[in-house]
Image: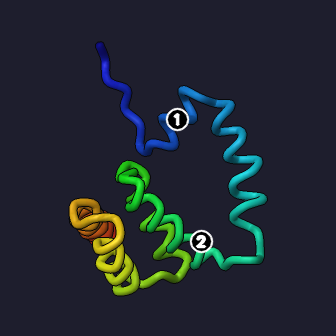
Amino acid sequence: MSKLNFNSPREAARAFTPKLAQFVDSTLYPQIWSDPALSPRDRSLITVAALIAGGHSEELPAHLRRAAGNGVTHDELAAAITHLAFYVGFPGAITASAIASATFSETENN
């Protein structure tokens, strides 16, 4: 069996479930992310926390980068991960810390 090579989980999902991608493109970004009730920065922090809490590490690098782009500092992300350790568990926080470290190391090296 050959392994499919995609740059991101979203790219893989888009290839396998184009209808899901269409829903994301037509609902999530234009309606949910653009709702003025929360800033993009706050939405990013909430999304990162939800991904960590749910153990969804595949999506975490992309959302960590998005959070940084939306104004969440590395120190704030580190504090959020530390805070989450007490509410969702240390293994998830340790994994998130490792992913954040690798994600930002890649970004800073490019």
Quadrant occupied by the N terminus? top left
* Local crowd size for mark 1, using a 10 Å CA cut-off: few (<14), some (14–19), many (≥20): some
**What label does residue 92 carry, if any?**
none
Q: What's the amino acid at mark 1?
A: Ala
Q: As drawn, is 26 to the left or to the right of 96? A: right
Instruction: Locate residue 85, reporting x and y percent.
Output: 29, 72
Name the residue located 39 percent from the left edge and 51 percent from the top edge.
56
Regarding mark 1 in the picture, which secondary structure is present there?
helix
**Residue, disc 1:** 13
Is 61 on the left or on the right of 37, as rendered?
Answer: left
Identified at 34% across, 83% down, the residue is 79
Q: Residue at x 48, y 35 (%)?
A: 12
Q: Nearer the viewer, residue 11 or 82?
A: 82
With respect to residue 103, does 1 lie above or below?
Answer: above
Secondary structure found at label 2: helix
Asked if residue 19 shows in the view, the reply is yes
* Residue 37 x %, y %: 75, 77
Q: How many numbered discs sit on the rendered protein?
A: 2
What residue appears at the point 52 percent right and 64 percent down from the top-left corner? 47
Report whether residue 110 is seen.
Answer: no
Image position, residue 24 (x, y; %): 67, 46
- Relative to residue 8, is residue 71 depicted above or below? below
Residue 35: x and y, percent?
76, 69
How far apart are the two marked residues, 2 and 1, measured between alpha carbons?
A: 22 Å
Colour scheme in use: rainbow
Say the numbered circle drawn on residue 43. Answer: 2
Q: Quadrant of residue 36?
A: bottom right
Of 96 and 14, which appears nearest the observer?
96
